[in-house]
Image: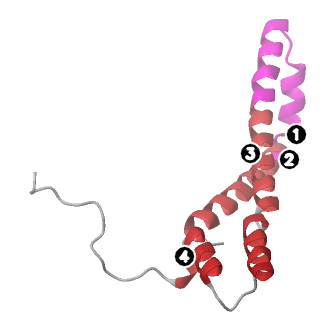
Amino acid sequence: MSDKISVVPSGGANPPESSKDPIRLMIEVAENENLSPEDKAAIISYSTNRFRNRRKMAYIALYTIIFSTIFLFVAALIDGISGTTSILQMISKNQTLIIWLEGFLVSIIAAYYGVSALRPSS
């Protein structure tokens, strides 16, 4: 059993200041004696609420992609059952626009989750 390699890092270089854990930053703010209680409350409130709109935007983009995918499957199902291709023909006429919109929505999601994974404190 003692031959196992630990998965916990055994020291090494400290992470850069920009990638500090948000919880650790909250603790540093709470322990800072130079700040008044009102300032501490304002800083903590700001840091917990500052990404709310970014998160909403990413979730709206994700739900829009999911809804559009469901719409395409339902349209194909309706056209398949009814024996017509009217809905899918309209979609294929606007295919380029749909592709660009979906790509834009994917880039919003990728930017939000990429930046939040790269820099947790942001």
Residue at 82%, 40% in the rendered image: 95
Are the residues flagged by discs 1 and 2 in contact, CB closer than 8 Å?
yes
* Residue with the mark numbered 3: 62
Q: Which mark sits nearer the N-terminus, 2 or 4? A: 4
Residue 81 has which mark?
none
Left or right: residue 112 versus residue 20 is right
Q: Which mark sits nearer the N-terminus, 4 or 1? A: 4
Dot in front, 4 or 1? 4
Disc 4 and disc 3: Cα gap in Å? 28 Å
Residue 20 has which mark?
4
Name the element at disc 4: loop
**Toward the viewer: 20 or 83?**
20
Residue 118 location (% of width, % of height): 56, 68
Disc 2 and disc 3: Cα gap in Å? 18 Å
* Residue with the mark numbered 2: 97
Disc 1 and disc 3: Cα gap in Å? 21 Å
Dot in front, 2 or 4? 4
Q: Residues within 10 Å of mark 4 (few under 14, many from 20)?
A: some
Q: Quarter-wise, where is residue 13 in the image?
A: bottom left
Q: Secondary structure of the magenta portion, mostly? A: helix
Name the element at disc 1: loop
Report the span colored magenta.
70-97
Are the residues flagged by discs 1 and 3 in contact, CB closer than 8 Å?
no
Query: Is 78 one of the magenta-colored residues?
Result: yes
Q: Which mark sits nearer the N-terminus, 4 or 3? A: 4
Disc 4 and disc 1: Cα gap in Å? 45 Å
* Residue with the mark numbered 1: 94
| Three-letter residue code for mark 2 | Leu
Q: Which mark sits nearer the N-terminus, 2 or 3? A: 3
Residue at 83%, 33% in the rendered image: 92
Are the residues flagged by discs 2 and 4 in contact, CB closer than 8 Å?
no
